[in-house]
Amino acid sequence: MNQQLQLDFDKMIKTLKIPEKEIQLKKSFLKKFIENGFPNRKQEDWKFLDISQIIKKNISELTFFNDYSLPNKIDPSIFIDGLEHNKIIFINGRIEKIDFSYEDQSQIEINDEIGKNIKFDYENSLIDLNNAFTNKVYKILIKKNYSLKKPLIIYHSTNNKIKSKNVNLSLNFELEENSCLRLIDYFSDNTDKNFVNILYNFNLKKYSILKNYKLDKFRNNNLKYSFNNIEQDDNSISETFILSAGSDYFKNEVNCNLNGEYSSAFINGVFSLKENQQHEIRSTINHLVENTKSYQLIKSVLGKNSKSAYQGRIFVDSKAQKTDGYQLSKAILLDETSEFNAKPELEIYADDVKCSHGSASGSLNENSIFYLMSRGLNYQQSKELLINGFLLDVVEKITDSEIRNLVKNIIGLKE
Amino acid sequence: MDTREKDIEKLKDYKYGFTTDIENIKAPKGLNEDVIKFISNIKKEPQWMLDFRLKAYERLKLLKEPNWQKPKYPKIDYQDLYYYSAPKSMKDKPKSLDELDPKLLETYKKLGIPLQEQARLNGIAVDAVFDSVSVATTFKGELTKHGIIFCSMSEAIQKHPELVKKYLGTVIPVTDHFFATLNSAVFTDGSFVYIPKGVKCPMELSTYFRINASQTGQFERTLIIADEGSYVSYLEGCTAPMRDENQLHAANVELIALDDAEIKYSTVQNWYPGDENGKGGIYNFVTKRGLCKGKNSKISWTQVETGSAITWKYPSCILKGDNSIGEFYSIAITNNHQKADTGTKMIHLGKNTKSKIISKGISAGFSDMTYRGLVDINSKAKNSSNYTQCDSLLMGNKCGAHTVPYIKNKNFDSNIAHEATTSKISEEQLHYCQQRGLNPEEAVGLIVNGFCKEVLQQLPMEFAVEAQKLVGISLEGSVG
């Protein structure tokens, strides 16, 4: 594996036209990654999803070099109908199109920012891998007082040209004062056995609002990892919704630093898993100053042989008085082979806080099924109705009505 | 001779039997095979016991100290410790209560501990006559009548080798984690309890009643076996502050409940926590594990942790038998620079198993409190359920309270519910109490006692009263 890494890295460096300084930087990231390797279950944060094993067993010969010289054909059938939107299209990790045609162009800036890698105080070898191999890092800046008229949809799509590939992509967003962005990540894959590694960094200035919806619905055999880092200034709001259903393996991480007073973060997630899928959401909310708020709701419906995990961590600094933190995770296990793991963590150093978490898991309530069946529904219908209601609860938390309806349609929820 | 006299005889035997000839003997410093052989030899242990220790030592060589826990401590040099020293001779002990630290006496007074017990706690030489007519002897007679074995571990190895051999190390194997394995290799003494079939132990068994309990040393080993249909309630420790020259305490406690048996294990731990600046103090690294081996068995842990500089323990239940029940009630209080990382593990293996966890953590001063727990429902544990509640109370913004639960559900028939909250004492409640004439400290004591009520209720009567007072005392100086 290490040999392959080095080989592919050298190949990539040859095709990239970047200054020597940046090459050195990339080299240092590669070195760090080779030292640590893919995360495994011995690491606390990866206890429930052992990427190292998954790659060994399911992908085996992973390669890291992607030839981005030729454009890919965009298949318009992947586009979402019935919702006017701006687009960024990634195919096999290559940016094919950036389209902000609905917006005032003077209010949005797009810059190529390769080399300005973001550094986190966070031990994560996949971020190192991403920093080493991304060939383009765009920064999207939304200017002061501008709210995007239409949502931005980032299409993450793969086609059959790639197999057993590692694809890394990275984007930077900066939302200036009082700006607003609605961002949808939409995954559609035509491939299997690839490892997609996505890194987003958001910088939210005062009074700005970010709404990020990650929709992974279509069944595919890929392994995906997504890391969102969100820095929040005074009075900013971030809302993250994750639909985790399509890929074989998917781990979503959200790291949110509430650096400004009265800032708030919301994370809601739905796992809807079937046959052999293993998904995880891991969130870290750092309450660093006074009067900040966070709310998290994660629900899972788990079918045969599937496994979901939720690791949520609320950290409250000793300065962060009057913090309000809440976490709730619930799971329905539909089969004897399904498994739910949770680790809702509270780490609190301030006394005037309101923090709580809850977690519940079990099977569908037999009494409720009985009630519905006595009203004339059959067993399957009753089950579906109950699951529908269970998940609807999370989807209703989406504040944007247009997108809420879209998500309902995608999941197939009825009201 | 009537039974009582016999008992007195036995007691004398026990008290002076082997201790006299080993007086002032110390094992050489350090940890190696010879030291282990020395300990085993001096205790006249049979070969299988020595083999057990050596096996543990072999394993220990491969193990590393764990470092995942929150409280960090300075590195311990295991080669710089004495693993065996004979109990202090009578000469070295304080002659009367007047020689003791007045601070300690004051605390005793607050807790309402009788003079006689105060003396016993500090190992003050009490003359034999006085001792032999004490409650302890009377109790001992009663226990023998029921066929209950309650003695020191060393005695059990000599007198009931078949029981010890059968059960020792079955719940905490010699291959367990570092400190448990260290204990298996070098443990000195501890308690042994066996309750025969169908016997309900008529009284609370307590280390109080076992003479020389205060000298069990730093590596204590306890084994409690409840045979079919029996019941026992065991009390460990006491509310009185305990001082000890050993800094590291790594005890192992094993409980085994067979079919329809019930064990209730209550602990009040008040080891020396170090001074206000966090200097000194005891490291309490205990491994406690109970095995509900039989059907319908039940193990219940209740603990009040107020002492020691670092507490690090997770009394656990392995629910192997069908319909077995595990319970864990805990109060952990940390003040000044104390650190506690405590919680439980409930491992559901059998069908219809139930577990309940109630944990209350209170941190004040500069202290750090962590609840760390695991609930694991195995795929074969059909129709099992768990309920967990862990609440933390913070006093001041220099301390920390953390909750780290691990929840694993592999069975779709089973339910797990978990709740946790963190808050502080509300100003309104304090104001109300003070308005009624309580001073701030009393008010806090009252509110905290209310917060802990669910756990205090689980303690045996006599213990509960003292524990309640202890909760108040532990938080002294944290208000205002």
Image: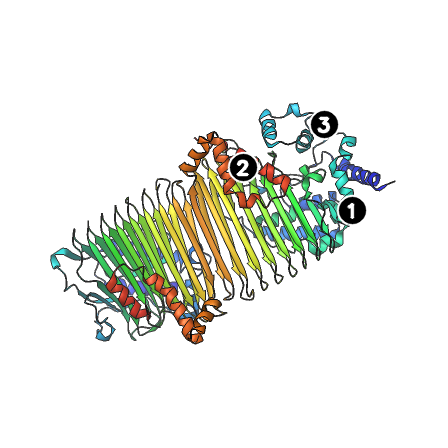
Q: Is residue A143 above or below residue B21?
A: below
For this rendering, which residue is in front, B306 or B278? Answer: B306
Residue B447 visible, this angle: yes
First-in-chain label (2 vs 1): 1
The crowd level at tag 2 (other Cα within 10 Å; few <14, some 14-19, many 20+) is many
How many angstroms separate mark 2 from mark 1 (CA)?
A: 36 Å
The crowd level at tag 1 (other Cα within 10 Å; few <14, some 14-19, many 20+) is few
Q: Is residue B168 above or below residue B97?
A: below
Q: Residue at x 38, y 59 (%)?
A: A298
Residue B149 placement (x, y as % from top left): 75, 48
Residue identified by numbered label 3 = B91
The quadrant in which the N terminus of chain B is found is top right
Residue identified by numbered label 2 = B471
Q: Residue at x 75, y 33 (%)?
A: B131
Q: Residue at x 53, y 66 (%)?
A: B379
Residue identified by numbered label 1 = B144
Kindly indicate whether the residue at mark 1 contacts the one at mark 2 (C-beta within 8 angstroms): no
Residue A305 placement (x, y as % from top left): 46, 70
How many angstroms separate mark 1 from mark 3 (CA)?
A: 33 Å
Amino acid type at image mark 2: Val
Amino acid type at image mark 3: Lys
Kindly identify which chain the residue marked by label 1 belongs to: B
Residue A136 placement (x, y as % from top left): 23, 61
Does residue A368 appear to the left or right of A14 in the view shown? right
Dots 2 and 3 on the same chain: yes
First-in-chain label (1 vs 3): 3
State the SS at label 2: helix
Kindly identify which chain the residue marked by label 2 belongs to: B
Amino acid type at image mark 1: Thr
